Image (cartoon, rainbow, N blue to C red):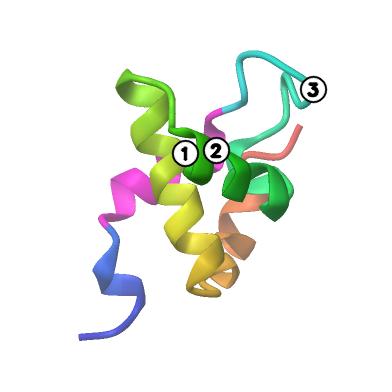
Amino acid sequence: MTEASLYDHRQLLELAAMRMPFGKYVGRRLIDLPEPYVVWFARQGFPEGKLGEMLRSVYEVKVNGLEYLFAPLRDRHSG
């Protein structure tokens, strides 16, 4: 099993497109949030619901060095 197959491709596409809905980084794609900010959420507690699930996924991607998975998706969802 490859690292890429650990993540559902639909979830990767959704993460590539989803933007932060509030706070200092409002409007920034979740995958582009600074790692210290995502780590802060991990320590303080992720929000409830879909956003929290997505931020947990972003945290796992960043902590495990899998950000390269998003390189081809950034172009697809730029702007």
In depth, the one of 4 and 53 nearer the eye is: 53
Measured Cα–Cα span from mark 3 to mark 2: 13 Å
Closer to the chain start, of discs 3 and 2, is 3
The kind of residue tagged 3 is: Lys
Q: Secondary structure at mark 1?
A: helix
Residue at mark 2: 41
Q: Horizontally, is 21 left or right of 64 in the view?
A: right
| Callout 1 touching callout 3 (CB < 8 Å) | no
Residue 8 pos. (x, y %): 25, 55
Quarter assignment of residue 14: top left
Measured Cα–Cα span from mark 2 to mark 1: 8 Å
The kind of residue tagged 2 is: Phe
The kind of residue tagged 1 is: Leu
Residue drawn at point x = 30 percent, y = 45 percent: 10
- Specify the segment rendered in magenta: 8-18
Quarter assignment of residue 28: top right
Measured Cα–Cα span from mark 1 to mark 3: 15 Å
Classify 70 as above or below 25: below
Residue at mark 1: 55
- Residue farthest left in this picture: 1
Q: Horizontally, is 9 left or right of 28 in the view?
A: left
Tell me if mark 1 has few (under 14), some (14-19) or many (20+) residues whose alpha carbon lies within 10 angstroms of its own: many
| Callout 2 touching callout 1 (CB < 8 Å) | yes
In depth, the one of 77 and 41 nearer the eye is: 41
- Residue farthest top in this picture: 22
Classify 32 as above or below 5: above
Residue at mark 3: 24
9 in magenta: yes
Residue drawn at point x = 33 percent, y = 24 percent: 50
Q: Secondary structure at mark 3?
A: loop
Residue drawn at point x = 51 percent, y = 35 percent: 44
The rendered magenta stretch, by its main secondary structure, is classed as helix
